[in-house]
Amino acid sequence: MRPTLRVNVFRQSLIVSGLFVLGLLVVNLAVFKPSTVAVVMLSGLYQGMLFFLIAAGMSIVFGLLDVLNLAQGAFFMLGAYAGFAIYGALPAGTPIEARFLAALLGAAVTGGLAGALMEVGLLRPLYARPVYQIVMTLGLSTALNEMVRAIYGPAGLVPIEEPPALATTFTVLGGQFETYRVFIIVVGAALMLGISLLLQRTRLGIIIRAGVQDSEMVQALGINVRRIFTLVFALGTAVAALGGMTAAPFLGAYPGMGTDFLLVAIIVIVIGGMSSYEGTAVASLLVGLTRATAEQISLQYFNTPILASVSILLFMVAVLLVRPTGLFGRE
Amino acid sequence: MSAVLTVQDIHTFIGQFHILEGVTVEVPDHSITALLGRNGAGKTTTLRSIMGLNPPARGQIQYRGQALNGRKPYDIAQLGLGYVPDYRAIFRQLTVEENLKIAERRPGDLDRKRQFIFEIFPDLEKLYQWPGGQLSGGQQQMLAIARALVPDNSLLLIDEPSEGLAPVIIEGMMAAIRRLTAQAAVLLVEQNFRVASQLADRYVIIEDGRSVHSGTMPDLLASPALIQKYLSAA
Amino acid sequence: MTKASRSAGLIWLGLLAAALLIPYGFAALTGTPAQDAAGLAGWASAAAAAYCAKGPTPLVWLQAGLLAGLAAASLAGRRLGAWAEAVAGARGGYLTGLAALAALPFLIAAVTNSSACTRGQAFFWQAIFVDVFIMAILAISYNLMFGFVGVVSFGHAAFFGLGAYSVGLLMEHLGWPWWGAVLGALAISVAIALIKGFVGLRIRGLYFALFTLAFAQVFFLLAGNRLLVNVTGAEDGFTFAVPDFLNMTKNRLFFYYLGLAAMVLAFLVVRQLMRSPTGRVLVAVRDNENRAQMLGYNTFYFKLIAIVIAGVLAGGAGVLRGLSLKGASPEVLGLDFTMTPLIMTLVGGQATFVGPVLGAFGLHLLEDFLRDTVVTVAGVSINVGERWALILGVIFILIVIVFPYGIVGTVQNEWRKRRARRP
Ligand SMILES: Nc1ncnc2c1ncn2[C@@H]1O[C@H](COP(=O)(O)OP(=O)(O)O)[C@@H](O)[C@H]1O
Ligand SMILES: [Mg+2]
């Protein structure tokens, strides 16, 4: 009884995405050994989850506030540094598991607080001037990166130790895979589901989805939209910061680490359709898998990972040309 | 009969444009007051000024003895004002239920009001889980009004409820609005003079951003010259 | 006089004539005193060549004299009145600025008691100003898109970097003569602009900005990749030989005037464009693209013109950068060379003609003046040079929030307000 255009378009996009993944799988099977295929797929998933952690906040914030937060990568970095600081500050003898957990939580809290501060102090004065907001976030990104460089030096910090249980490797179809990467996949998937539930099931979620369309009307219903903006912005930066700390055990922490991820996150949300949460979730996995596949092909044939980044850039350009508003975008 | 709302000589700017140049409106409790006037006269802007969406630069707005000037829209709404804009502003991605739920000011508002809303707008019951974007124009209008009924509002600002609706549906809508006066005062903007004249108890005519005339509806109906001067299409 | 020095002199003069005639020819087309000034910049480079030629050949003097005479005749004959008016009027500022820049190498030489033609203080500052001119051209180009046409590009570095790379690669790997390589590099800029335009301009607003970011990033990645290490030198970049007269180490004063002339040319091109009917349509597109379309303009076509001109200007700046450093490395394709002209445009004043130039001068010179300055605030010593990027980021944020119209825009607004207040 609900024949709807919108739902059909959504389903179509899902089917296209499914076919794309299937195609990637076929390419994988045709080009690699089964053991490599398994590793490539898992590696695509874990990369996709990291991309998701940065992109999720950007996409929701873009939908609600019409601001593309180009400083989101800097929050990813901030999370890693905050996590390291907490990890190191805990007294000797604290079990690694406790340190690690504290670092993760601390990163998220720091990211959230810094995000709230940014929204209130820097974005609010600019709501009447949208282009300037984006430009400002770009400036803030530079400033944060340089601040970290000034305080901690350009070299970056050595990766911290992850809990011993996660420091192992395991074998899938004969391919070696690190347990920690599975941990990242689990964290990413949990947040993906959690955010989805938040959006669909809670009052905050209803307000966010309504605000994306018409925040003025939401306000006229008696809801302090500004406060919701701040909250959502902070949640977005908290998730990004958590992502940075999650990646820290094998990336370490260095100035500019977020910039690489930011570029990929931008690609993800453009492919996903900018303000569509579902689109961002699906696109981050598509981009992760594409990147992993291209990387492996590139390593195998050219002996350099060059195609990894180029492939997803081309992926984005292709999507924009076929559907200028992205896979799940509206209008 | 005490006034729920008094708007005293407000001046409102949008950008550099001086849109309202002195509007005075009084809305008595438990009655319907119609804002009349030609297209572009400033009726919508008056409602938006009251809600704080286009705050007036000068003049006073009093609601139950409290000044609304300087308050934020959400703050004004929380005092008990419900706004039904001319474009209805139904959230397309949200179901009918969610569209109502978002208007709650206290938990349980919707549970308390659901039966009442279904009684006034029976259509909404069977559409309860539909996304707002898929309702017809008339259904969206019902939902927009219903949304203003979820909290205990005592003043409803309704902008052009009959616009674009079929005559049969307009009849139903009128019946519904008439019922609302049991619990709230209504400030109604209505282009359709037949509808306005049948619904409203009092009227205020706005012309070029100024309120130029007001009184009771029977008086207006008895004065064809006034109608001719301010409200005729030509 | 040796044969070698004579042919070198001839090549020189050919180039000087070009440096003179390109802006001067442009001036002749449009005929305002400010454009005559462009001719003066060309003339100054002729004079500089003669000055540093150490025992200038009679031929050099003859040619330089001829060109000077031509310019003088034109000034005296056709435009003397207009000139007087200009010096007294609003354009006086431009002309004074230009005269100051033309005299600057000699002023610095006099003040620092060094030679304008050989290694020393004056030489050092000439190099800094060459950089300033290059960045100013890039900012002028950025402002054309951002300020006047309202198109945000996050990939301007692609034009700049490809200009630097292609001029070097064409000379070094394909053995093209310098002028062929310069023309080739500019042609590549046009091609890139056309691709960006045809592919990207269908996409609006933010999507276009992100598209350009991705586009530039592809080249950045390719340039730094080891796949092409034999051609591009990967992360380290590559160096190439340039003819003596273009060699900034040897003929720096000449390069100084070349850079100055190029900047003036870029300035005039954009000003002339924006004052033409095409420019008015571009501003209409910025203010309301739909309305411009409804008025019957093919807005795509107009934006394409703008992006091609902006591309050539930015590509030209890149060519100068490549020639001046006699090399190119991936950083010229990086985000910095998009960010910096954007900041310069904002600081100076977007959608103004002189704003981006002032922004480039201000920021670049500030950086150089403060390079080794150590500021101590509340017991913490900050080396300004090392923290320049941080300072730039903070300036950036402050400008965006406090002075959204930049220096020139703010001054203009104040000026207008003051005039409006007077009855
Ligand atoms: N955002 C706006 N910018 C400029 N003018 C506006 C804007 N909104 C409304 N107006 C002008 O204000 C006047 C009153 O509009 P409105 O209150 O919508 O009239 P009404 O509801 O009586 O038809 C009209 O002339 C309209 O053109
Ligand atoms: Mg109206």
Image (tube, helix red, strand yellow):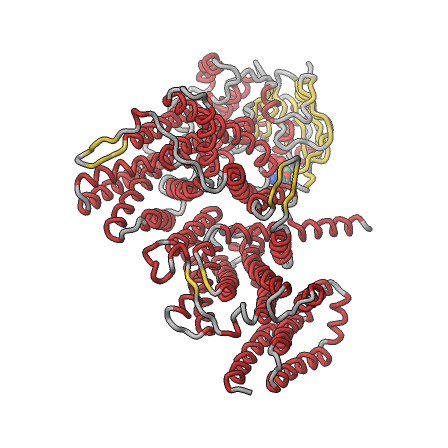
Q: Which residue is at a point 35% across and 42% down the rendered structure image?
A: A327
Q: Which residue is at a point 52% across and 33% down the rendered structure image?
A: B87
Counting from the top left corner in percent of width and height, residue C327 is at 46, 63
Quadrant of ligand 1: it is top right
Q: Quadrant of the N terminus of chain B?
A: top right
Q: Which residue is at a point 58% across and 66% down the rendered structure image?
A: C259
Counting from the top left corner in percent of width and height, residue C215 is at 41, 53
Out of C383 and C257, give the one closest to the viewer.
C383
Quadrant housing residue C120: bottom right
In the image as oriented, which residue stretches furthest toward the right?
C423
Looking at the image, residue A165 lies above or below residue C262: above
Residue A310 visible in the displayed image? yes
Quadrant housing residue A40: top left
Q: How many marks?
A: 0
Q: Quadrant of the C terminus of chain B?
A: top right
Looking at the image, residue C350 lies above or below residue B188: below
Q: Is residue C34 left or right of residue A219?
A: right
Residue A1 visible in the displayed image? no
Out of C201 and B12, give the one closest to the viewer.
C201
Counting from the top left corner in percent of width and height, residue B25 is at 69, 26
Q: Is residue C198 left or right of residue C357?
A: left
Counting from the top left corner in percent of width and height, residue B184 is at 59, 17
Looking at the image, residue C72 lies above or below residue A316: below
